[in-house]
Amino acid sequence: MSTRPTRRVVLATGLAAAATSLASACAMGGAGGGGARGISGKEGDKKGKVSGKITVWSWDVAAMAMKRLARTFEEHHPGTTVDVVDIGYDNAYDKITVGLRGGSGLADVLTVEGSYMPRYAGNFPSGFYDLTSLGGRYGGDFDRAAWRTVTGTGGAVLALPWDIGPCALYYRTDHFRAAGVDPKSLLTWDDYVAAGVRIKKVTGRKLLIMDSTDAGILPMLLQQQGQSYFKGGRVAVDTPEAVQAMTLMKTLHDKGLVDYEKGWDGLVTGTKEGKATTTPTAAWWTGTLTEEMPELKGKFEVVPLPGFTVDGIRTSNIGGSTLCVPAQSKNPRLAWAFIEFLLTGKANQVSMLKREGLFPAYLPALDDPYLSAKQGYFGGQAALDVFARLARNIPPVENNKDDAKATDIMISAVTGVMLRGKDPRATLSSAARQIAAATGRERVK
């Protein structure tokens, strides 16, 4: 079967090259001054009647979902047309950035990954409609971590969250059984390492697959501890939590528990071949397993991530997206109506999970019986229910316009520690100095 990258790949890898391109393009600043303006009654009927046409930009399964549900929206709102265009991920951020810089050429609704939204909001402060008066009331209905990515200066709501990537630990039941390891005993990362040593000794299998050219599991480990590369506007890559995360990664390498593979294809192929016994990642990996590895049905189950302490947070987040209305939209009322229809209804959210594998950021959808149903691929385990329970505990963290600059520096730091044996604390201290110099930000003290 094809291992061609999909939207899930993008969310998993972060694609550093795309991030760098975004950073350099945004460095030129946003079009216009001042803050975002709200959608008023002048731009549509206050009673909710909408008409006309909008264009929506997205890609891959997200575009498929919107094309499917756009037909239902049009039936509910006669006189409207929703044109969903799959612009492809490779070109998406170049097109969005060029449109924001030039002040024209964008669709009425844009798909933007959650971690990217704060970058755009910071670099283009007048580039999006302020949806606070319309969407602010939904804040309590969405995952807290996802909601933070869509709120700008002063709490302004600039988008609505769509899907998220709650993390857990996928594991091979046959490998664990052969080594006599109880997956429920993996309460801490120390337990995880110890289990990996035993599994490797008994089965010859390594513990996890990583790509030596990216930051690996570091962002996931940081968010699990309640931070990103920044905290309170300051550079936070050399905090005790960051040192703890990087030290864990070095330990995994030093004990020979990491299988290094190149990119997404390497991860998929390595998993198919059983080179590693676990994958600590997000809920969307389920779709990859069932689509790309049907022959491994019954050999995987899921448990919460190990914590840094026995009572620590047992999840994190990788990926997820938002929908926003650029300020240049010609029909912002209709744009908002479509976003509201798509993202604030339980039925639509559950249908997108069933059909396109998009895990809802909308919390009411997580109570649907579909998520608690047993799944044959996972040997009858209700795997989605594990993620649904974890999703409510994802720590909100800070993303900002300088994330791309920090990412480039942190990839070098991870490579230095993992492959060249550098000291985690010293390496992170050096990385913090570099990021501070590159961004003009102070460091966390």
Image (tube, rainbow, N blue to C red):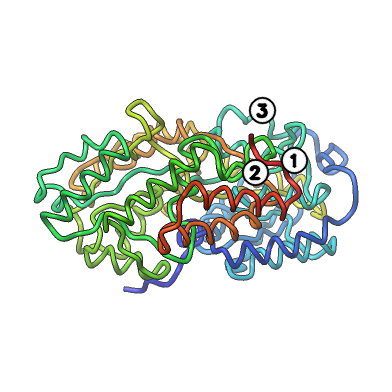
The number of numbered badges drawn on the structure is 3
The residue pinned by badge 3 equals 137
- Residue nearest the viewer, comparing 382 with 68: 382
The residue pinned by badge 2 equals 235
Q: Position of residue 234 (x, y in %)?
A: 68, 40
Does label 1 or label 3 sit earlier along the sequence?
A: 1
Amino acid bearing label 1: Lys
Give the CA separation, mark 1 to mark 2. 46 Å
Q: Position of residue 405 (x, y in %)?
A: 66, 57
- Residue nearest the viewer, comparing 206 with 413: 413
Asked if residue 116 lies left or right of residue 214, the reply is: right
Residue 122: image tag: none
Figure check: 140 above or below 224: above
Q: Could you tell me if residue 351 is visible in this image?
A: no
Q: Nearer the viewer, mark 1 or mark 3?
A: 3
Q: Nearer the viewer, mark 2 or mark 3?
A: 2
For the residue labelled by badge 3, is the local secondary structure a helix, a strand or a loop? helix
The residue pinned by badge 1 equals 49
Amino acid bearing label 2: Val
For the residue labelled by badge 2, is the local secondary structure a helix, a strand or a loop? strand
Does label 2 or label 3 sit earlier along the sequence?
A: 3
Q: Are the residues tagged 1 and 2 within 8 Å (C-beta)?
A: no
- Residue drawn where x is 31% and y is 65% of the image: 292
Residue 369, quarter of the rendered image: top left
Amino acid bearing label 3: Arg
Label 3, residues with CA under 10 Å away: few <14, some 14-19, many ≥20: few
Asked if residue 342 lies left or right of residue 224, the reply is: right
Q: Position of residue 194 (x, y in %)?
A: 22, 43
Asked if residue 362 lies left or right of residue 327, the reply is: left
Q: Could you tell me if residue 203 is visible in this image?
A: yes
